[in-house]
Image: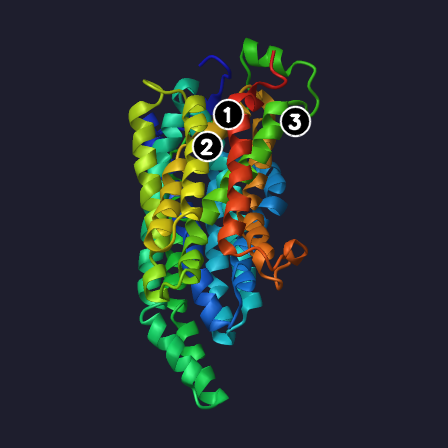
Amino acid sequence: MSNQTVTMNVPSKQAGYAQSMAIIGMLFFVFGFVTWLNGTLIQFFRIVCELNVAQALLVTMAFFMAYFFLSIPSSFILNKTGFKNGMALGLLIIAIGSLIFIPAANARSFGVFLTGLFVQGAGLALLQTASNPYASIIGPKESAAKRISILGICNKSAGALAPLILSSIVLKGAEKLEADIAAAVDATQKNALLDSLASRVIGPYLVIAIVLTILAFLLKRSSLPEIDTNAEDASTAAATHGKTSVFQFPQLVLGVVCIFMYVGVEVMAGDVIGQYGTSLGMSVDDSKYFTSFTLVAMLVGYVIGIATIPKYLSGKKGLQISAVLGVLFTVAAYFNTGASAVTFIALLGLANALMWPAIFPMAIDGLGRFTKIGSALLVMGIVGGGVLPQVYAGMFNEHSMFNFLYSSSIDFRHAFLYCMVPCYLYILFYALVGDKIGKK
């Protein structure tokens, strides 16, 4: 490869390229499944814990804030454990976060639920800090976007299944249940209904914890090769010569902001779409499946990426096209109502699909010995998935932590437009010139 040499600590029975990709694909499936449960949880907690929209969107805040606080520590952990052991540890931490849902459900405590989500996010921060650079540099640089697109199919297939599975369990008959809760004659009857609903989440998350623990054990015992990112070839050594800090790479710093914007719009399109639908007057029984529509659109985008990158499109060109589509679909959603508006929001999944596969390799290109810390900073940018929904809620809901943005003249449709379009325009800037800044 032209930009960076990596070495592998080869065990006696080393996994080949295909087997390594299969193992990493399994990991991408895991964090896709866990992440995209949040869209269902937002609606679930809104009913169970009797929350307003801004409070329910704290689900994404708690989950993604873990990336901000724990991505840098993750890079130091990986320096001690290596990639494979770090990934196994990440799976165990996610399992612990899943187990916290059991006492949270028994107490019907939103705070304890948020704690479980934060712990899950911590495990995913470690898992993503390890798996994304591994996927980027395990093969040729030119096909990195294609490789991550393939892994993205694993991720978003899980994401499409997750809300369907969880919704069918925890939100079954939600509309009737909401009516029963509203019609409860006294607090005792109401609490009994809410407690019964809260208990529905225990079984799924207990199963998740068990499966993740088994996967951690199998990963630990696997022959996945270790990658040494500190090794550099002549060109990479020249590019990093004299550099003492990762912040001396402008394409990385701008890339962190780009990841922040991208994950923000991805979560808005996937997790907020259900709330957007109910705000348009649709029932919870219908809107609980909307997240899956977005994820299916992303799957289509990944298939397009695999078919076209790098044969017909570079990852960079794909990112440019994606950003433009993001603007167009957002504007179209604003000018439509009902099913048409929801359809355009779901189509944002198509626009978002090629963004992560393009941004991550572009941002870490040429970092050499700074790759682990650079990857950690990029994973920190995932916090945008928690911040942007709160900014969105703050524009039209005075109870949000961003209520200083509140204006009675702004409704949810305007707020969605004002949040999304600037983000897509920044992503377009990065795709056009941002990744070149500071490079010779």
Local secondary structure at mark 3:
helix
- Looking at the image, do the residues carrying marks 1 and 2 touch, with CB atoms under 8 Å apart? yes
Percent position (x, y) of residue 86?
A: 51, 40
Label 3 or label 2, whichever lies nearer to me, is 2
Mark 1–mark 2 distance (CA, rounded to whole Å)? 8 Å
Residue 49 can be seen, yes or no: yes
Mark 1–mark 3 distance (CA, rounded to whole Å)? 21 Å
Local secondary structure at mark 1:
helix
Residue on which the image places disc 3: 246
Residue 277 occupies which quadrant of the picture? bottom left
Dot 1 or dot 3: first in sequence order is 3
Percent position (x, y) of residue 100?
A: 50, 64
Percent position (x, y) of residue 392?
A: 55, 52
Query: Which of the image's four quarters has the C terminus?
Result: top right
Residue on which the image places disc 1: 431
Which of the two residues, 173 or 220, is positioned nearer the viewer here? Answer: 173
Query: Which of the image's four quarters has the N terminus?
Result: top left
Dot 3 or dot 2: first in sequence order is 3
In the image, is residue 49 above or below residue 395?
below
- Looking at the image, do the residues carrying marks 3 and 2 touch, with CB atoms under 8 Å apart? no
- Counting other residues with Cα less than 10 Å from the Cα at mark 1, is it few (<14), some (14-19), or many (20 or more)? many
Q: What amino acid is at disc 1?
A: Ala
- Looking at the image, do the residues carrying marks 1 and 3 touch, with CB atoms under 8 Å apart? no
Q: Kindly identify the residue that appears in the image at 41 percent across and 34 percent down.
A: 325
Q: What amino acid is at disc 3?
A: Val
Residue on which the image places disc 2: 323
- Counting other residues with Cα less than 10 Å from the Cα at mark 2, is it few (<14), some (14-19), or many (20 or more)? many
Which of the two residues, 142 or 124, is positioned nearer the viewer here? Answer: 142
Percent position (x, y) of residue 427?
A: 52, 32
Q: Kindly identify the residue that appears in the image at 43 percent across and 81 percent down.
A: 182
Q: Kindly identify the residue that appears in the image at 49 percent across and 20 percent down.
A: 6
